[in-house]
Amino acid sequence: MIKSKIWLLLLLAGGAGWAQDQNQDEGDYIEFNDRRNVVHGVYLGLGTYLGEIDGKSTFHGNFKIAYVANQQVEVGFAAVGFYSQQNIPLNTFENLDFAGGYAGLHVEPILFGKSKLNLSFPVMLGAGAVVYVEDNNRDVDIDFDRNDWDEVFVVEPGVNLLFNLSRFVQLEAGMRYRFSSRIDLEPNRVKNINGFSAGFGIKVGIFNMGRNRYKKHIRNEQ
């Protein structure tokens, strides 16, 4: 009877010690997922837009390179080139069109970044130059010796609808309005390059870089 009681006490003590070791081992780990914290991304983007300058059709090409923080905001560099069919009479055989480009800071807050379809609000702050170009029966000639170019400063807010094809490819469609500084060029017809534009683009890169571990060992530093 005494031996049975001794064995029972030993078993209880051993079970308690094993349970304590298990709890200690479990306490040495935490479960986590880095993608619930900060997800990084980077991409190159190309786009094309159609709009107006001074009531005339204008074609835009867009280039972007940006860092994406946690699928919530983009910060990067953007450049835009445009060509506007102004058809300003120069002489009997030639007309003047209008062209230019600008580049600068690109910032784009993103809503619903974790879903397939996102809404974003891009803003561009930039500077560039504009110039009249000779359109001689569609043979465009840019003559910089005529001193017909001028610098321009631009603020361009917009709204985009983004569709995530995969973690590497994203499509965008949207519209924007460009505000510019005043332009002083002869024949002085185009006063600024303010105007709406709308179009689409594609972004190629990695939009959700991040380590995805589930357990981390906590070392006893005491």
Image (cartoon, helix red, strand yellow):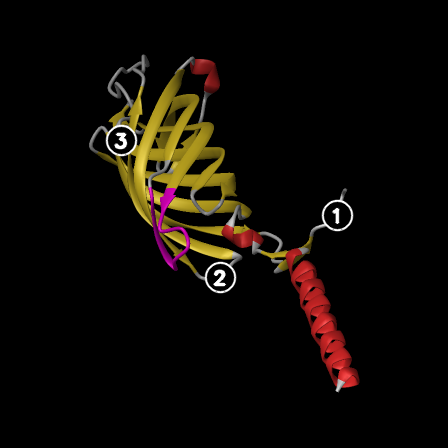
Residue occupying image coordinates x 32% and y 17%: 181
Q: Of the residues under marks 2 and 1, which one precedes in the sequence?
A: 2
Q: Which residues are magenta?
A: 110-120
Q: Is residue 161 visible?
A: yes
C-alpha gap between disc 2 and disc 3: 43 Å
Image quarter where the N terminus lies is bottom right
Frontmost residue, 208 versus 60: 208
Q: Is residue 18 above or below residue 122?
A: below
Frontmost residue, 186 versus 177: 177
Q: Residue furthest left?
A: 55
Is residue 114 located in the magenta-colored stretch of the structure? yes
Q: Are marks 2 and 1 in contact (CB under 8 Å)?
A: no
Tell me where residue 46 appears, x and y as whole percent.
Answer: 47, 46
Q: Is residue 174 above or below residue 188?
A: below
C-alpha gap between disc 1 and disc 3: 77 Å
Is residue 164 located in the magenta-colored stretch of the structure? no
Q: Nearer the viewer, mark 2 or mark 1?
A: 1
Q: Of the residues under marks 1 and 3, which one precedes in the sequence?
A: 3
Q: Is residue 15 above or below residue 67?
A: below
Residue occupying image coordinates x 54% and y 47%: 41
Q: Are marks 1 and 3 in contact (CB under 8 Å)?
A: no
Tell me where residue 155 appears, x and y as whole percent.
Answer: 34, 25
- The amino acid pointed to by label 3 is Asn
Q: Which residue is mark 3?
A: 87
Label drawn at residue 220: 1
- The amino acid pointed to by label 1 is Asn
C-alpha gap between disc 2 and disc 1: 41 Å
- Along the horizontal axis of the image, is 80 left or right of 220? left
Element on which disc 3 rests: strand
Q: Of the residues under marks 2 and 3, which one precedes in the sequence?
A: 3
Tell me where residue 176 appears, x and y as whole percent.
Answer: 29, 37
**Residue count near mark 1 (Cα–Cα under 10 Å), binned few <14, some 14–19, many ≥20:** few
